[in-house]
Image (cartoon, rainbow, N blue to C red):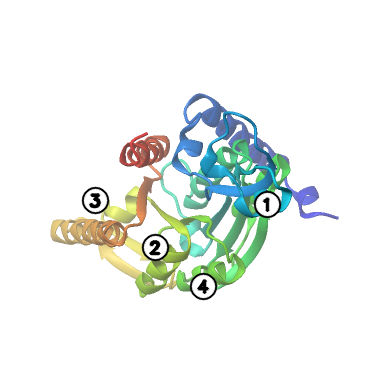
Amino acid sequence: MSKQEFLSEELIAQIKGIQLRAKHLVTNTFAGEYKSTFKGRGMEFDEVREYTPGDDIRSIDWNVTARMNHPFVKIYRDERELTVIFVVDVSASSAFGTVNKFKNEISAEITALLAYMALRSNDKVGLIIFSDHVEHYIPPKKGRGHVWKLIREILTYKSQARKTDLAVPLEFLNQVIKHKSIAFLISDFQDEGYKKIVQTTAKHHELIAISVTDPKEMEIPNIGYIELEDAETGEFILVNSADFSLRSGYKMHSAKNLKEQKNFFQSSGIDYININTGESYIRPIAEFFRKRNKIAGR
């Protein structure tokens, strides 16, 4: 029996809701944005045919022309098809959320939105889900049913690992996808030592980093003594949230980390999108496409 047959009605409804919302956004908000941002690999040779008046003489295939004793021209086609890979963090911290949705739910919605954009342009989409190791890999493929599978995996995959190791999925990506792809790295980036592999990956693939954070990860509310658990390590610590210096220091530290993260990606020439679970992800994604198209002069 397939995994899908064990899904609850509630989860099936959630996946369908994500699909419908993504399709609506692709049609009404992001129509044309993806295709104008991500171009194909250029023009690929297709065939030769006999020269007809009006053809560009620069396209004449002189070798064939010499053999056939009359002019032939080269015909090219636009090599549009792209491969899009979603590299999604499913470590323990992804199952955290204090507003309306967990981070993994936001990750699933973002993946659905971008996957349907790719599908509309007839591109293939694949998925690598990871924690401190590669949990699961779904090879690139086309089709709405395939997108359903990607959403389902992100929402339902229960990792036993607590920590995040960003180097592992990126090394795996570089091994299994030999040609240049578009890779969306979706994580809360609660890891260290990933800068070198990120920069290496960006040389082989068009890498876009999407950071998903929760408001409560950025500051501690004033509610007295609270016990905090580090989702990545499982360690607990008792703190007095009424202490202004504690709250202020934590907020400054979180803001500093987020800024350094953004600066690293931008200085490395890698697009960076910050998504807050307490806000709509539509605006930052729309801003990403707007900036990319503006830079390209489109």
Instruction: Name the mark nearer the viewer: 1 or 4.
Output: 1
Is the residue marked by circle 2 packed among few (<14), some (14-19), or many (20+) residues within 10 Å?
many
From the viewer's perspective, tell me whether residue 291 is left or right of residue 62: left
Is the residue marked by circle 4 packed among few (<14), some (14-19), or many (20+) residues within 10 Å?
some
Please name the residue that numbered disc 3 is placed on: 222
Please name the residue that numbered disc 1 is placed on: 64
Percent x, y of residue 243:
17, 59
Please name the residue that numbered disc 2 is placed on: 189
Q: Going from the N terminus, do you reach mark 3 or mark 4 first?
A: 4
Residue 287 shows in the view: yes
Percent x, y of residue 119:
62, 40
Residue 109 shows in the view: no
Q: How many marks?
A: 4
C-alpha span from label 2 to label 4:
16 Å
Q: Amino acid at mark 4?
A: Glu
Residue name at image x 35 percent, y 70 percent: 195
Q: Amino acid at mark 2?
A: Phe
Instruction: Name the mark nearer the viewer: 3 or 4.
Output: 4
Percent x, y of residue 97:
44, 50
Instruction: Give the SS element for disc 2.
Output: loop
Please name the residue that numbered disc 4 is placed on: 171
Instruction: Name the mark nearer the viewer: 1 or 2.
Output: 1
